[in-house]
Amino acid sequence: MRTDGAVRGGPADWARGLLLALALVAIPLLLGQQAPATLTQDLGSAADVPNATGLNLSAEQSPQGPFRWGGSRVTLDLQALGAPLDVTLHVSGARPAPAAPALLGSAAGGHSLGVQALPDRATDVTYRLPVAALLAINPRLTLTSTTFQPPGDRRKLGVVFFRLTTRAGPSPVWPAPWPGGWLLLSGALVYAAVRAVTRRPRLALGGVLAWGVALGVLNATARPWLVFYCQYFAAAPAIALLLVPWGRAAAARRRAPPPPADPPHPVLTTQPWPAAGAVTGGALLVLAWHLIAPLIPAGRTPTDNWTYGVAFYGALPLPLQVLGVGAVLAVLLWAWRGAERAGVGAAEGDTRDAAISTATIHGTPPLSACCVGRDIVQFAAGTVC
């Protein structure tokens, strides 16, 4: 005999389904991760470089191409394309003739990656980031260098930066914790949402398989885009899961008998104004931020570290994203619970009205005021006031 947890729809059944859903997302995601992924950024372009601090704000030209001077300390925030993660810098240690060669030191994830002398010509320097650096949302590479001051120039110049190339590999390559965790969570939420809507576990697993294959294809062909927007892939199924009770209530109303001549208005939620205010206020804040963000100078607070992408991508800082998503989810949950309470009250009222109508048809007097709080079983047995 099966226990309650093993009954279909019980906790054990849901746990098995969620484990299968995670596997159906993890396998395509891991297969797509083996495809080569490279992201190249031109540090000498005229555009802002929001993921870098310590670089000269103005770009310059040279026979080797456009570049920017770096100071004594330069930090570069990278995209977590996978583990292992290799970073290649196209740099030059240009110095006046009497000056000593430029020395470039590097560190990431609390580990030193060494110090080396740079030639006065353009060359490539490659680093492999330690695993500890990949635990961050955006792995950070910190560079230090010796400096010199040209005659008549107030700047202290370090190393010439041309390009930055981030590459995942070689195989086997594993997803970084931040994007991998969000994408796995999205698969679990898809399973829960489809199963809640259809109440068919196999159909839910089929939907998760299609979702996992799509993520695997994106991971193989558009990984930088997928990594940057990974957290948004969990938002759609989460909202769908919260809207399941509303959808069921709407379907139930369509199957219900025709209402009386003057039916009451359907109550979707007992708190409509907070929900409408939260959505409208959130939209206005996002609109205002997209007007303010491009005015923030790149490469300076608050556009470094965990707020990477504010000016360049026009995205909200991570704490505000978390706060906004949490507020919307809280309001939806509030409205959801209010709709459930309203539905329970309406169902009880319908049951009472049906009992009174049945008693009247069979000749039994209807309930008077003194019988409102009395057990309906007594009334059905013929007890009247």
Image (cartoon, rainbow, N blue to C red):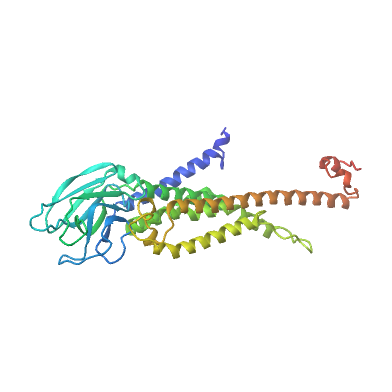
Q: Quadrant of the C terminus?
A: top right
Front-most of residues 233 and 285: 285
Q: Is 339 positioned to the left or the right of 372 in the image?
A: left
Q: Quadrant of the N terminus?
A: top right
- Looking at the image, which residue is at 30% across and 65% down? 47
Front-most of residues 129 and 140: 140
Q: Quadrant of residue 265?
A: bottom right
Q: Is 353 positioned to the left or the right of 102 in the image?
A: right
Front-most of residues 134 and 84: 134
Q: Is residue 140 visible?
A: yes
- Looking at the image, which residue is at 40% across and 54% down? 230
The single residue placed furthest to the left in the displayed view is 98
Count the labels in the image.
0
Q: Is residue 203 visible?
A: no
Residue 180 x %, y %: 38, 48
Front-most of residues 210 and 161: 161
Q: Quadrant of residue 112?
A: top left
Residue 85 x %, y %: 27, 49
- Looking at the image, which residue is at 47% across and 53% down? 320
Residue 329 x %, y %: 54, 51
Q: Is 269 positioned to the left or the right of 375 in the image?
A: left
Residue 202 x %, y %: 50, 49
